[in-house]
Amino acid sequence: MKTLQRTLTIVKPDAVRKNAVGDIIEQFEKNNFRILAMKMLEINKHQAEQFYAVHAGRPFYNSLTDFMSSGPIVALALEKEEAIADLRKLMGATNPANAEEGTIRKKWATNIEHNAIHGSDAEDTARFELSFFFAGYELAK
Ligand code: ATP
Ligand code: MG
């Protein structure tokens, strides 16, 4: 049986700069994700480091956290059956050179770092990432 899941997605600064926010949110709705919460904000370098702490020590960590704190982002809490896997499918591969036709990264990503969108990759990371951006009372019932 498929279970209802929640996942956290971010429209990254590159996609906001390209005016892709509306198009990307439309993809969520067309693919039957329910939007539970949504906010536009900027995070600072320290907050980006906390959010991407799992990547601390990777060669791209400094540049990634600079990028994620370089301008406005849009964070959304989404709900759907199999939301985590379905969102990853809709996003496409991390490197847009490998992303399939019809995916958000194929359409909007510039390169492996400036790749338009983030999505949680497992239930435990989804819980951490949802609570990073949203308090319980902010999620639609
Ligand atoms: P995300 O976690 O943002 O949803 P992902 O799960 O597809 O993306 P991760 O391996 O978790 O990819 O990497 C996190 C982010 O770090 C990537 O989305 C990308 O912005 C950046 N990144 C990953 N690998 C590289 C790399 N080799 N060079 C530069 N940036 C990278
Ligand atoms: Mg990831």
Image: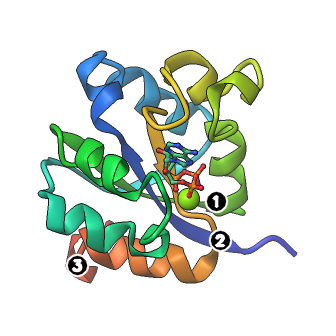
Q: Quadrant of ligand 2?
A: bottom right
Q: How many neighbours does mark 3 have within 10 angstroms: few (below 14), some (14-19), or many (20 or more)?
A: few
For marks 3 and 1 on the same chain, the one whose residue lies earlier in the sequence:
1
The answer to whether the residue bearing label 2 lies less than 8 angstroms from the nearest atom of ligand 1 is: no
Q: Which tag is nearer the camera, tag 1 or tag 2?
A: 1
Give the residue at mark 1: 83
What type is the residue that disc 2 sits on? Leu
The residue under the point 45% across, 51% down is: 60
Pointers 1 and 2 in contact (C-beta within 8 Å): yes
Give the residue at mark 2: 4
- Residue 30 location, x and y as percent? 58, 31
Disc 1 and disc 2: Cα gap in Å? 7 Å
The residue under the point 50% across, 63% down is: 58
Front residue of 59/116: it is 59
Specify the quadrant of the image occupied by residue 17.
Answer: top left
Give the residue at mark 3: 135
